[in-house]
Image (cartoon, rainbow, N blue to C red):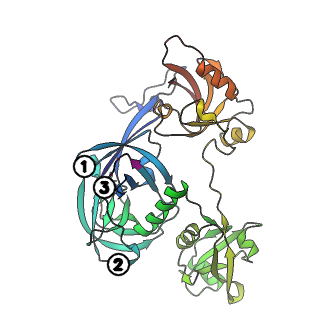
Amino acid sequence: MSIYTTSVEKGGAADSKGQMGFAPVPRAGSRPRKKRSAGEGSGVIVEPNGTILTNHHVIDKATSITVRLSDGRDFDAKLVASDARTDLAVVRVDAKGLPTIPFGDSSKVRVGDFTLAIGNPFGIGQTVTLGIISATGRSDVGIEELEDFLQTDAAINPGNSGGALINAQGELVGINTAIYSPEGANNGVGFAIPANLARKVMQQLLTDGKVTRGFLGITMQPMSPQLAQALGVPDRFSGTLVSDVAAGSPAAAAGIEKADVVVAVDGKPVHDLGQLKLAIGLTPPGASVRLTLHKSGGVVRDVTVKLGERKEKPDAASSTQATENSEDIIDGAVLTQLSDALRRELDLSDVSTGIVVAKLDPSSDAAAAGLRPGDVIQAVDRKPVIGLDDLKAELTKPREGKKNALVEVLREGGSLFLALPLD
C-alpha cells in the first residue's frame, strides 16, 4: 500500500530560483514564507483494524497522511507513534477487515533466499520487484543509530521506504528502508529492517507510545588493527573498545573500565560497535546482561550489568515539563512557558519571551496552519504574549467574524507569521 504525506516548512528567498538558477536577492524586511511539500512512501498493513507499519522518515514532520490501498481506496491516517532510532513508525486508518500480511521469522533468512520488494517507487503506485538476500546483519551502514539490516538486490527506489520485503512463502521478513546509491536510484544495494526487530519495536509503540531502551553508560569506539595489537586482542574484528565510562552508571557499578574491550553479550560474540549498540538498545531497562570483557594484561572476564533507562534527548522545546491542560488553548498543542533552560536549548537571548510549543498533533488544524514543535509564540494579532493566560485571552477574545488569528512565532532564529484557525 502507498502513503502520501504533506508537510509545511519555513521557506525563504532561496527556495525560489530564477530562470538561470540564481536565488533572487531578498527584500529588506521580508519574512520567511511557508513552503508546502509533498512526499510519498509505502507501508504494510499488519492488523485488520487499520494498523500500518512504515518508516519514521516517511511520516516525519508530516501534517497530513493519506493511505492508498491497492484497490484505489484512500484513507486519512493518524500517527500512533514512531521511533527515529530504528526508523520505524505506526500509523492507523479508520477501517476494518483489511487484508494483512503474516510476519515471518527474519532470523531464519539466509543469503541467497529469494525476496520480493513491494512498494510505491517514485509515487507511481504499487510495484513488485524480485531479488535475493545479499547479506544479513548489516550494522555498519551508517543510516540509523540502531542497525541490523537485511541487504537485498530487489529493486528499491525512492518511494519504496516503509514497504514490505517478503520471502517465497509470502511472509513479511523486512521493512524496506534505504538504498545505497550516489545517484539516488536503485543500484542493487537496498536495506530492510528485519521483521523481528520491526515487530518488537511496533509492539512497544502500540503499547507504550514509545520505545524504552537500556542504558549501559559507556562511550564506545570501533576497533582497529593498531588498537587490537596494542590491547592484545587477537582478532581486529573482535569486540568494541570502551573509551569512557560515565560516573555512577551501570557500567561503572559493574567494574567496567576504560580500555576494556567488550567481546560478547550474553555469550554471543560482538564483532563491531553496531552489534553492541543494538544489543543494549533492544534490552529493556532493569534487565541484566552478561558482558564478556577483554581487559588489560590479556585477562578475559565476565561481568553482569543491570541496565538503567536511556534518557532520550528531549525534542526541541520539551526539556521542561509541558504545562498541563494547555491543549484547551490551541487544539492539539501542548504548551509550556519559556524558561532559562529552554532559552539555552533554543539558542535564544536571555530577554526572549513567549510560549513554547512542546508537542503538536501533526493532524491538527494548528499543524496544517504551519505551527511546529519548538516554535515560540511571541504575539497574537501583533500583541505580545508572555504567559499562557495572555495567549488564551488573545485567542478567545471576540473578533467580529474573523476565522483566523495572526500569530507571530520565532523559529530557528527568524520570525514568521501564521494564520491560526480559531475554531
Location of residue 23 (image quadrant): top left
Rendering coords of residue 47 (x, y %): 37, 58
Tell me if residue 216 comes above or below residue 181 in the rendering. below
Residue lying at the far top in this picture: please name it.
400
Q: Which residues are magenta?
A: 92-97
Tell me if residue 327 comes above or below residue 179 in the rendering. above
The local secondary structure at tag 3 comes to loop
Rendering coords of residue 49 (x, y %): 37, 53
Tag 3 residue: 157
| 249 on left or right of 4 | right
Q: Around disc 2, counting alpha carbons within 10 Å, would you say few (fewer than 14), some (14 to 19), or many (20 or more)?
A: some
Tag 2 residue: 110
The residues bearing labels 2 and 3 have C-alpha atoms spaced at a distance of: 23 Å
> Which residue is painted at 46% across and 67% down in the image?
197
Tag 1 residue: 125
* Disc 2 residue type (three-letter): Arg
Q: Around disc 1, counting alpha carbons within 10 Å, would you say few (fewer than 14), some (14 to 19), or many (20 or more)?
A: many
Find residue 72 and name its label. none
Q: Are marks 2 and 3 in contact (CB under 8 Å)?
A: no
The local secondary structure at tag 1 comes to loop
Q: Are marks 2 and 1 in contact (CB under 8 Å)?
A: no
The residues bearing labels 2 and 1 have C-alpha atoms spaced at a distance of: 29 Å
* Disc 3 residue type (three-letter): Asn
From this viewpoint, is residue 363 visible? yes
For marks 1 and 3, the one nearer the N-term is 1
**Foreground: 221 or 118?**
118
